[in-house]
Image (spheres, helix red, strand yellow):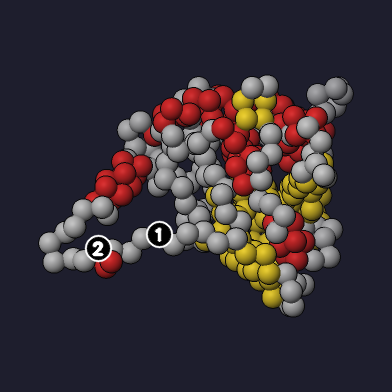
Amino acid sequence: MIRKALFAAAALSTIALPGVASADIAQPAPCTRVTDLVGPVFEVKQCGVSDVDQFRAGLENNGNAYCGPASLYNVLHYWGHEKNAPVGWLSTKTKDLDPQDPADYNVVTNSIWRIGVDAKYSGGTKMSNLQTAWNIATKPARDAGWATAVGNIDSKTATDFAGDLAKKLARGPVQMVYGRYSAGPAAGSLQRGGGHIVTVVAANGTFNGSTMTLKLADPGRALDHGDPGYLNTQSAYESLDVTLERKNILQYSPVSDDPNTDVDESLEPGTYKYVTRWELTGARYQGTTRQFVETFNWFDMAPPVG
């Protein structure tokens, strides 16, 4: 397992190897928070964001569709550990948990499950319902005098999606959703066929620009996925590099059937509409579909005054 390999590497780093001075062994550079929003170029980086796995024994279908709750846990972990905010549920607070500690693994899993319940998980979660789950988890903080805020920005309507993301990320990690798109019925059209939710921890780009680079904590892309015991252990934390490029796409949307009517609406023709989306590419994001970022949830908190 990767986790065991990291423990072994950490142990070796304290041993004087023959012919190698201890100063020659490079140590991981400490994370430095960056919030540069001055000028046309922005650079933002948050530290202390967890990178929990969504694939866990005990969750429905081993957590296959728990990317939303897991990525929101990463956000709550940040506010608990970096800002000392009392966020959580009853006696469980994220600031008291370390997802990398095996002793806390089951409690973290239960917390992800609880977020799913509050977000009305039903084979997946919606971004709007995840905002509700945030409001529930942050109620202890509000009861203690903290101010909290949450919102969503959609690439279809934002005038500066990249700049908006940078500004919100400067306050804390954001939760971003991308859709998986394949060819639609008409030539050149694209049709959404599911999606995935991740946590954004860093961003570089330009205000009003058409490209930007991000670093993601992705709950569904652990390197040890599928290894023996992976459903009962936390993987090593990673920050995955991706590039986003603004695109204007012709999106096809089929009509969904309304179960409350006698007519099968799904037999009606779908609709086509040009929308602005941001195509996501990266070394760990190769597949048979194209990924387009659609929206992100942003979160903010402020401690009591005085």
On screen, residue 59 versus residue 207, left or right, reads left
Residue 284 placement (x, y as % from top left): 47, 56
Mark 1 belongs to which amino acid? Pro
Residue 109 placement (x, y as % from top left): 53, 28
- Name above or below for residue 138 compared with residue 278: above
Q: Residue at x 56, y 24 (%)?
A: 110
Judge whether residue 258 can be spotted in this image.
Answer: yes
Q: Residue at x 56, y 49 (%)?
A: 48
Q: Nearer the viewer, residue 42 or 208?
A: 42
Residue 16 placement (x, y as % from top left): 19, 57
Q: Label 1: few (<14), some or many (≥20) within 10 Å?
A: few
On screen, residue 57 versus residue 206, left or right, reads left
Q: Residue at x 80, y 30 (%)?
A: 143
Viewport quadrant of the C terminus: top right
Q: Secondary structure at mark 2?
A: helix
- Name above or below for residue 72 compared with residue 186: above
Name the residue at the left extreme. Answer: 18
Mark 2 belongs to which amino acid? Ser
Count the labels in the image: 2
User: Mark 1 or mark 2: which comes first in sequence?
Assistant: 2
Dots 1 and 2: beta carbons under 8 Å? no
Residue 90 placement (x, y as % from top left): 68, 21
Report the Cα–Cα distance between label 1 and label 2.
14 Å
Viewport quadrant of the N terminus: top left
Would you name the residue on which mark 1 appears? 28
Q: Nearer the viewer, residue 214 or 23?
A: 23
Q: Secondary structure at mark 1?
A: loop
- Name above or below for residue 1 compared with residue 27: above
Name the residue at the front extreme. Answer: 306
Would you name the residue on which mark 2 appears? 22
Give the image quarter of residue 171.
Answer: bottom right
